[in-house]
Image (cartoon, grey):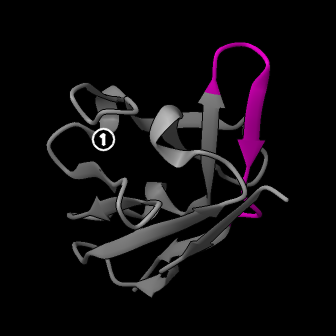
């Protein structure tokens, strides 16, 4: 079955870095666009970054540009999110998403990122 398993979250001080990973299985990873979303308490889920299936195209939310980097390894069926310069406002549950067209749309269970001193 389809699985997206996020890892790498945790507690970090402001200005620190984290690298999230999302390991995919149960579908042809290289044919899916991948994204990271996040949801903070009391807020709607929002797009953080996206990467096309070939990794030729990436897209970032304005507030993440220059701080976050999305990448993928189709050989390892994994998508990554490198987060630098973390701020308390980055505190949220981060979710991995896999999408192909309108029909196929999968979510991971999320990983908590807390930025606090």
> From the viewer's perspective, is residue 97 above or below residue 112?
above
Q: Mark 1 highlights which residue? A: 64
> From the viewer's perspective, is residue 64 above or below residue 74?
above
Q: Nearer the viewer, residue 8 or 53?
A: 53
User: Residue 49's image quarter?
Assistant: top left
Q: Nearer the viewer, residue 116 or 45?
A: 45
Residue 111 inside the magenta-drawn segment:
no
Q: Where is residue 73 in the image (x, y as percent from the top left)?
A: 32, 58
- Category of crowding for the residue at label 1, using alpha-carbon neighbours closer than 10 angstroms: few (below 14), some (14–19), many (at least 20): some
> From the viewer's perspective, is residue 29 above or below residue 81?
above
Which quadrant is home to the C terminus?
A: bottom left
Q: Residue at x 37, y 29 (%)?
A: 52
User: Residue 44's image quarter?
Assistant: top right
**Left or right position of 86 against 8:** left
Q: Which residue is drawn at 53% across and 75% down?
A: 114
In the orientation shown, which residue stands out farthest toward the left? 66
Give the residues in magenta: 100-110
């Amino acid at each position: 079955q389809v699985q997206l398993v996020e890892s790498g979250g945790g507690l970090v001080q402001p200005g620190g870095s984290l690298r999230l990973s999302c390991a995919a299985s149960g579908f042809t990873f290289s044919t899916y666009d991948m994204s990271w979303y996040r949801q903070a308490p009391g807020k709607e889920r929002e797009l953080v970054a996206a990467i096309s299936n070939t990794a030729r195209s990436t897209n970032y939310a304005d507030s993440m540009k220059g701080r976050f980097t999305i990448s993928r390894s189709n050989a390892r069926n994994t998508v990554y999110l490198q987060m630098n310069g973390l701020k308390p406002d980055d505190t949220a549950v981060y979710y991995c998403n896999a999408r192909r067209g309108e029909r196929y749309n999968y979510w991971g269970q999320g990983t908590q990122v807390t930025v606090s001193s």
